[in-house]
Amino acid sequence: MSSGKRSRVTIMDVAREAGVSYSTVSRVINNYKHVSPEKRQRVLSAMTRLGYVVNQQARSLAGGRSQVIGLLVPTVGNSYIGQIMQGIDEELAAAQYDLMLYTTHRQRTKESVYVATLTRGMTDGLLLLLPLGASAYLETLRNEQFPYVVIDHQEIGGTGPAVVSTNRQGGYHATEYLIELGHRRIGHIAGTPELSSAAERLDGYQMALAHHKIGFDPALVVNGDFQTHSSYDAANVLLDLPQPPTAIFAGSDLTAFGAVDAIRNRGLSIPGDISVIGFDDLPEAASMHPALTTVRQHLLEMGRVATRMLLQYINDPDCERGQVVMDTELIVRDSCSVPKR
Amino acid sequence: MSSGKRSRVTIMDVAREAGVSYSTVSRVINNYKHVSPEKRQRVLSAMTRLGYVVNQQARSLAGGRSQVIGLLVPTVGNSYIGQIMQGIDEELAAAQYDLMLYTTHRQRTKESVYVATLTRGMTDGLLLLLPLGASAYLETLRNEQFPYVVIDHQEIGGTGPAVVSTNRQGGYHATEYLIELGHRRIGHIAGTPELSSAAERLDGYQMALAHHKIGFDPALVVNGDFQTHSSYDAANVLLDLPQPPTAIFAGSDLTAFGAVDAIRNRGLSIPGDISVIGFDDLPEAASMHPALTTVRQHLLEMGRVATRMLLQYINDPDCERGQVVMDTELIVRDSCSVPKR
DNA sequence: ATGAAAGCGCTAACAG
DNA sequence: CTGTTAGCGCTTTCAT
């Protein structure tokens, strides 16, 4: 409105304009009960008249909350993360929170310093997405009683605050579906082994094989990292096997995309020559050609739920913290069929 | 370290521990020149001993910078944004800045309030990625002299602080390449018209046609929004034309992905039946099958450059602000060939 | 119901 | 080179 320097209208200015003390203004801002309707109205109109905007820094310094939560992600830019973040964002918007984004690879700093910055810093709580090798700081967070929720991962044997899916069942169903189609040599491109979600899917895969009396061949399991690129190579390893699989259970949809590329690049067709099943059900899974059969995980909802849990922990530090498990569902589309011969 | 409540070691504690005044500690933190090496050392070691971490809120309240910049994005979760964000993140990490993420669709709030929150709020500067219909707040930012840089868009006729590519040339080259291959009916799936990048690519497309004496058929240009999903529909419109194009210039790679799906879903082959060329050169472009011929834009670098510009504006409010233009480059791969007959 | 006053942790003059 | 002194804008007792 005014020129040059950003005008900083403070609580004081509002108080003067409204003819009240400045603590009354504070009360109005914080929606306190005991303020006469009349004064509240005066303050409110003074605020809009002056174009007052709270200074969050001051608020949080003075002991209030910062109204920002931090999100730690390994990377951005794929729709797996996009889906989850959308859920987070929706929930945060509703609660008037802002989002601070931290990319995990940035931890060049000494880890303890990193966590300290995070917890004593400007966030009221932390959301950790697929925290690779994060156990160290998870412990710090726990010890400091800092509010946090892990998404799509749970420490081995842990029951910490987390939102996860029924990964084992999902892996089981995916594999069983392939078996029922008639496949016997089923490859699996696993995710990063430290992630519980990856480990459990692999586990489900093995359980299904065992249940159907199919011998487990370690050569059929290759390690990926849930990303498309490395999965391309992983799929090639599988295809180069003396006795290649007739179907591949990809640890994630992103993984499946890489496998699909690898298979196509050899001139093989899907599902004609090789069947592929994914995990996640990202938006692309439905639109790609052939549409990807996959195990649906409610990604967006996981983001929302995790956020709601976190907000609850922030508001009630003593509330019980546990993990919530979301279901998964086999989505049959066009990328799997009976084995070739 | 201690139990329960997060221990807050302040500058005072450090001062006491080091046996200096607390402004000396502040000087050390801010790397001021005039501190005796000896005291500086004492302070430093006291800091690590106590596990001191600066309180950013207090710092910025006291007039310093907040060390956070805000990034406004329309959405996350696609690799176009991922690439740019990676560039931003790298540069920010180097400068010890944190990133606040704002999704544009969140502006339900009155726009002026939104901008006010942003500018008087907790960020030292703003990076705007593809700000749709943002002209309104761009003006506010300009008037308030708030540091900002727009990425991959420039207001029509404007020369504001922005990082853009040679979109017109890119569009021209893409189209010309198709023409030289022998195509005469070339479709274009345009991006959101308000975005200069979209408008310029369309412009380049038309210039190439004109230059090669090919009549412009408005029916061959359909509007998309740079996203994969809508592009699927757009491509279908093109394919349903009584006289469909033999080649499609997609306004972005994401657009190309949608077009590729649409084409494949009709049982048509690429480039056999239809050639497709994209714009951006996202990582997927190289790995997909067939590999996508496209116009490369240095996305990651654009993120870095924009960030460096912003940081410079923040540090030197009086420095000149202009736009920087990055080059584009035709990357020939396998998705284009001579027309069918 | 409302005002006064004391900080939150830090930066930035200001004196020495 | 270093200590002292004010605030930054707000939340929060504590009185009234």
Image (spheres, coloured by chain):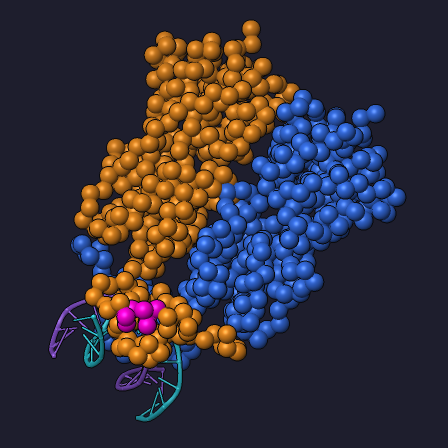
Chain colours: A blue, B orange, C purple, D cyan
Residue sticking out furthest to the front:
B38
Q: Residue B125, percent across and down?
A: 31, 52
Q: Is residue A110 left or right of residue B208?
A: right
User: What residue appears at the point 57 percent right and 23 percent down from the top-left corner?
Assistant: B290
Image location of residue B298, percent across then percent down: 40, 33
Q: Is residue B269 left or right of residue B129?
A: right
> Can the viewer see residue B230 in this picture?
no
Look at 54% across and 42% down and name the residue there: A78
Q: Is residue B183 magenta?
A: no
Coordinates of residue A314 in the picture (x, y in percent): 51, 69
Asked whether residue B181 is in view, the answer is: yes
The answer to if B40 sits in the magenta stretch is yes
- A165 shown above or below B238: below
Measuring 32% from the left and 72% from the top, which residue is drawn there?
B42
Q: Along the line of sight, which residue is nearer the eye, B269 or A186?
A: A186
Location of the N terminus of chain A (image quadrant) = bottom left
Q: Position of B308 compared to A81: left or right?
A: left
Question: Bounds of the magenta span?
Answer: B38-44
Q: Vertical placement of B172 versus A250: above or below?
A: above
Location of residue C14 by image quarter? bottom left
Q: Is residue A182 left or right of residue A334?
A: right
| The C terminus of chain A, quarter of image | top right
- Give whichever of A25, B36 is nearer the camera: B36
Nearest to the observer: residue A218 or residue A65: A218
Which image quadrant for residue B200?
top left
Q: Is residue A216 above or below residue A142?
A: above
- Residue B238 x %, y %: 52, 21
Q: Residue at x 81, y 43 (%)?
A: A216
The chief SS type of the magenta part is helix
Tag count? 0
